[in-house]
Image (spheres, grey):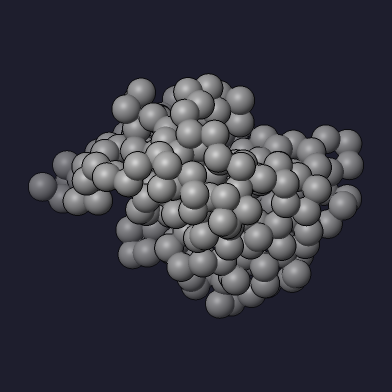
């Protein structure tokens, strides 16, 4: 049995090293109940929180360049789309039935998705496009994957940050430059149980649950603080 797992891990590591592995995890969680709120109720809450309510917008994920973060058409289905201007950029928020993250380097391509759960997505437009950056919660599974060489983790100068969070990026050098102390501090101030990613020219954050306009307004403000802390020089030559 031990030999089997050693061989299996070796094969998986080899596939990752060859850059042809795509990891897709589809999980149906308990938080998949239907949203019973009416569009009128959510629209009223959105207006009160400073959002412009759109409602239905099937092409929003494609326009934002985020379609690849979802496993299938069902998980990528959006609801209660809304937008607003925040700190000179456009923030977009909506509900989805899934979420995910992906990363591609010279040697590896990783894609992890979940499906069947209610999530709220909030994005903020950045001044320019940057290499992919994923800020993930650290856990026992991640530590094991790192020790086996299956999942990368970028260390920073903050021990607390390294203990709590994992950074998976497509460009480690630029990720180090991006993670200035002010950026790390802003990232750690995020709302509980939220993700943070950079995909193209978008700061992206998922949170399990329905799209709540007041919470999304707070999250958009947090993304604006993170964006403001990113040093200008990381955009140069991009």
Q: Residue at x 78, y 53 (%)?
A: 87
In the foreground, 206 or 104: 206
Residue 92, position in %: x, y?
60, 41
Residue 85 visible somewhere in the drawing = yes
Quarter of the view holding residue 20? top left
Depth check: 154 or 41 in front?
A: 41
Figure check: 96 above or below 168:
above
Considering depth in this image, is 121 or 103 the residue closer to the camera? Answer: 121
Q: Is residue 33 left or right of residue 226?
A: left
Residue 119 in the image: state x and y as whole percent: 38, 47
Q: Is residue 179 left or right of residue 139?
A: right
Q: Position of residue 75 (x, y in %)?
A: 34, 32
Does residue 62 lie above or below 173 as drawn? above
Q: Is residue 69 visible?
A: no
Where on the picture, by quarter, is residue 64? top right
Instruction: Please identify the residue farthest to the bottom as the structure is shown.
Output: 160
Give the residue displayed 40% in from the left and 39% down from the top: 39
Q: Position of residue 73 (x, y in %)?
A: 36, 23
The structure residue drawn at horizontal position 80% and vertical position 48%, both measured from the top left corner, is 88
Between residues 52 and 201, which one lies in front from this camera angle? 52
Quarter occupied by the C terminus: top right
- The residue shown at (33%, 64%) is 140
């Amino acid at each position: 049995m031990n030999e089997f797992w050693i061989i299996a891990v070796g094969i998986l590591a080899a596939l990752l090293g060859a850059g042809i592995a795509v990891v897709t995890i589809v999980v149906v969680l308990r938080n998949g109940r239907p949203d019973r709120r009416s569009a009128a109720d959510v629209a009223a809450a959105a207006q009160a929180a400073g959002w412009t309510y759109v409602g239905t917008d099937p092409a929003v994920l494609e326009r934002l360049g985020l379609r690849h973060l979802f496993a299938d058409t069902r998980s990528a289905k959006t609801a209660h789309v809304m937008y607003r201007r925040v700190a000179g950029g456009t923030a977009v928020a909506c509900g989805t039935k899934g979420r995910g993250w992906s990363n591609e380097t010279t040697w590896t391509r990783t894609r992890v998705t979940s499906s069947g759960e209610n999530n709220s997505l909030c994005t903020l437009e950045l001044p320019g496009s940057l290499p992919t950056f994923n800020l993930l919660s650290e856990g026992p599974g991640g530590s094991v994957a790192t020790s086996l060489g299956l999942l990368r983790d970028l260390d920073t100068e903050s021990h607390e940050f390294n203990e709590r969070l994992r950074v998976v990026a497509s460009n480690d050098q630029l990720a180090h430059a991006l993670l200035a102390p002010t950026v790390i501090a802003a990232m750690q101030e995020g709302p509980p149980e939220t993700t943070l990613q950079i995909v193209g020219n978008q700061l992206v954050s998922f949170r399990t649950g329905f799209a709540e306009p007041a919470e999304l307004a707070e999250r958009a403000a947090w993304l604006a603080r993170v964006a403001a802390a990113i040093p200008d020089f990381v955009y140069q030559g991009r």
